[in-house]
Image (tube, rainbow, N blue to C red):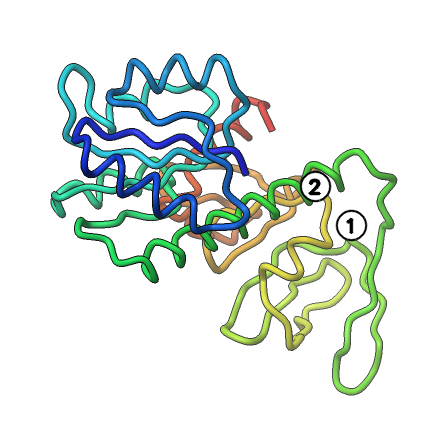
Amino acid sequence: MNCIAVDDEPLALKLLQDNISRVPFLKLAAACNDAFEAMKALQENKIDLVFIDIQMPGLTGLQFIKSLENKPLVIFITAYKQYALESYDLSVVDYLVKPVHLDRFIKACNRAKELYELKATKQHNAVQPSVEYFFLNVDYSQVKVMFDDIIWIEGLGDYIKINLKSTKKALIVRTSLKAIELQLSPNKFIRIHKSYLVAISEITAVRKNSLFLKEMEIPVGETFRDTVEKLIRNEL
């Protein structure tokens, strides 16, 4: 993963560069002293991940990330805790408060790697001929489920509940929502909450904090609002 480091404090930037060098799957493309240098680095390189401070002169880290139309993955590293909530509205990978221990830093990087690979898998699936069904282990049987039969899927810890058009009885399957999401076409299904995947064709209305599948109202998670907005604008 190509990344850049952005911090106006020289010592903090040097420490960040050192931490990045310890993570095998990261390649540092640029070390920047402010957001303007970072902007130039993004224009000149394909960047997958940005490590950035918040309080910087001229343009803060938050302002810089908000200004980007096509956002890479972002990890904020700052001495201030009070911006955490605002940062998560930007769907950042993580929010690290200085001083950052190496194990915590690596944990954030691993999270970024997971999201990067998930995105790459979705893009790959989008251009591949897709199978229109899968078999799932339900009550000691392999049950065939057609993708077009799915209305929505709910995550329940180590299980998922699949709600179908063809039957009122939901299927309970021992797997994770993330694992099932990787098998579904991103052109047909959308993640709207940490606990919900829905069939795009079944959505009948959208509100700020929820959407409807006919009479069924399902919450939209804070970090998934941008995705739903893109769906409304037909940008997915």
- Where does residue 116 sit, x and y in percent of width and height? 56, 43
Where is residue 53? Give x, y as percent: 23, 34
Does residue 204 appear to the left or right of 90 in the view shown? right
Cβ–Cβ under 8 Å for marks 2 and 1: yes
Q: Quadrant of the N terminus?
A: top right
Task: Give the number of the disc on residue 148.
Answer: 1
Q: Amino acid at mark 1?
A: Asp
Residue drawn at the location 50% of the way across and 27% of the way down = 47
Q: Secondary structure at mark 2?
A: loop
Check disc 2: other Cα within 10 Å, few if <14, some if 14-19, many if 20+: some
The residue pinned by badge 2 equals: 188
Q: Between 123 and 161, which is closer to the camera in this rendering? A: 123
Q: Quadrant of residue 125?
A: top right
Q: Amino acid at mark 2?
A: Lys
Q: Is label 1 in a helix, a strand or a loop?
A: helix
Among the two numbered marks 2 and 1 on one chain, the one whose residue lies closer to the N terminus: 1
Q: Residue 225 vs residue 13: left or right?
A: right
